[in-house]
Image (cartoon, rainbow, N blue to C red):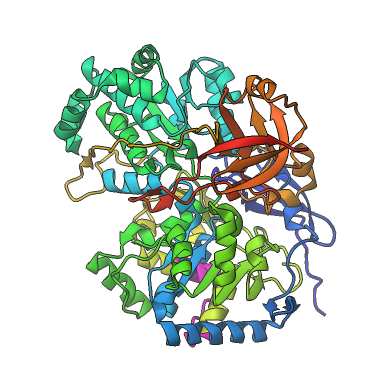
Amino acid sequence: MTEPKVVPNKIPVVCSYCGVGCNLEFTLDEKGNPVKSRASGRNKEVNDKYLCVKGFSLHEFVTSSERLLYPHIQDGGGMRRASWEEALQLAARQLKEIIRRHGPDSVAMLCGGKILNEEAFLCQKFQRTVIGNNHVDNCARLCHGPSEAAMDRQLGFGAVTIAFADFDETDTVFVIGAHTNATHPTSWMRLRKHAGKRLIHLVVADPRSTDLVRFAEMHIKPKPGTDIFWIQALAAIILFRGWNDSEFCSRNTIGCDAVLRSMRNLDVRLACERSGVPCEQLEKAAELIHGKNTIFIWGMGLTQHAHGTDSVSALVNLALLTGNVGKPGCGLSPLRGQNNVQGAGDMGALPHHLPGHMLVEDEASRLHTGAIWDSVLSSSPGLSASEMINEIASGKIRALYVAGANPAISEPHASFVDWMLQKLDFLVVHDAFMTKTARRAHILFPAAVVGEKEGTFTNAFRRIQYTSGGLAPPGEARPDWQILQDMARAMGINWNYRNTEMIWEEVRRTAPIFSGVTYSRLRQEPGILWPCFDQNHSGTLRLYEDGFAFRDRRARFRIPQLPKSLMESTSAYPYVLITGRLLAHYNTGEMSRRSPKLLRLASESFVQMHPQNAKENNLTTGQPVRVVSPYGAIVTRLSVTEEVPAGYLFVPIHFDEPNVNILMSTVPFDPIARMPSLKVIPAAVEKLA
């Protein structure tokens, strides 16, 4: 007699919202459906028993009635339901035909930042071995592409250098261009506790007066996009005072003398004037760094500009100059926005990196990886996400494969992007919901989400964590790794992964920095921080304590190039519009807007305006207005608040109606990170009749 199947009443998972990687558990009803999300307390090193409102509502998007249930095919008259076999075979035939007619370089792939490590690994493997090029990228391009580029070139890895424990050992924390209470709430709880008790000196650099300012010892209010000027000025002040750590620089860096010469030639007064930051305030900020363990945290206010890589380089230089890297309580921390955007880059879902941050241009790395995959890998770096869109217009890219991303909403100049998606000969999408990108797909596959598949995520602090499966995906939805394997087989490549652990074992063989991380360890431990080179290694709590990730073990100073022009207001567009995030929502909102709890907190978009500007234009809170930029226009409601300074506007990024990225620009372009400037744009506000 068969024993009845025991349905668990709880499933432990890692949150699939922001980059903190909070551990929680789903409580299940008698049918095995999640009805509650709660902090499990099983990982005291990450979030212990704390969650933000998004974590508490995680189960709501999982159980949404809007989940995709079946494969669909676009047949000219709209989407129709299809069998898996029909959809897979059609997708394979179309991709093969496009490759036959236009070559493998005509096909590109975009990988999401919320799928599993194992799935991101298969995304880039599919592109490199099944399709045959390096045209693969992930959504980090639009957020921390400049951070990855600058830190990779100067330190060796494009990753956070610190661990959570460093917050307990630091003296001073700079938060630059980031609203951590909204973007990484449980991390902010730790900082807020220390700042509230005056255990640390908290310096917030942000044009807006967010709720972080209440806890800050100093609020630096630069003009948007000018951080590079005040950071350079701060470094020069520290140098003039003799507060630089010359011993650290001599022992651990190269290029310092060249950078010091450039700093001595810097006109500090002019740099302060350019940024709008008083020199006297920077003099005080220098005192808060001098002789103190300092952590530098930043968000997209620093990176999403045409000079974003140079801005991050200036900040890395400042950390090196003061000896604040590779020591307890010191370091650099770009706030990665999505739950596995760090992991997507780690797994090689980048046009210039193989798994484990090995360069595609490095012959030994290609030979090593290619031997494991039984493939000859291209040495030519691929296109970035934004370049892919532009090359659709040129006709170079004819097909696009999108796994868990939504470029129709997330990319700047969104109307143009939507047009380009319609110009494609062929678009394949996997997603859990009918996103705007999914609506343009020729083949649409329904994807499983967190709790419905086991695997690993890597949080913003390099911590690889195991997340359990156990929930039944709705309808015929499948995990992304299974869809990718089915597609590879349909294309004639016999992948044979039985589970995600088999994929992870291949990750370990491919990328030495993960070779000591096993599923058996992850199921028992509260995550492992890479690099971890063997199973006896506990992982690397803090990067660069024993030297930097170059052959000579030395970090690289670089001379950042100051921008010659900025996004500034004009007579026709008298305001500078800033984009950003809200506590209640996440990224393009496709998950969070399916949560009734989160929608009650923030149900629609808005534009913030300072009371002085509202009075000048005879506008009031709640009034519908048209926001216009050189690229487009949206209609939304006005919110009058002193949170934004006079002359500036703020609109959140989480809504598709209206989508603020309709207003944003694809030029100028960061030439190093290969991403557009999408943080600010000149804009006008018009009263609706």
**Residue closer to the observer: 50 or 626:** 626
Residue 500 inside the magenta-drawn segment: yes
Count of numbered labels shown in the rendering: 0
Q: Is residue 516 above or below residue 612?
A: below
Q: Is residue 633 above or below residue 255?
A: below
| Residue located 53% across and 58% down the image | 456
Magenta-drawn segment? 490-504
Residue 570 inside the magenta-drawn segment: no
Q: Position of residue 436 (x, y in %)?
A: 66, 61
Residue 134 in view in this figure: yes
**Residue closer to the observer: 357 or 582:** 582
Q: Position of residue 377 (x, y in %)?
A: 32, 74
| Residue located 18% across and 28% down the image | 260
| Residue located 68% across and 51% down the image | 656
Q: Quadrant of residue 85?
A: bottom right
Quadrant of the image containing the N terminus: bottom right
Majority secondary structure in the magenta region: loop
**Residue closer to the observer: 555 or 561:** 561
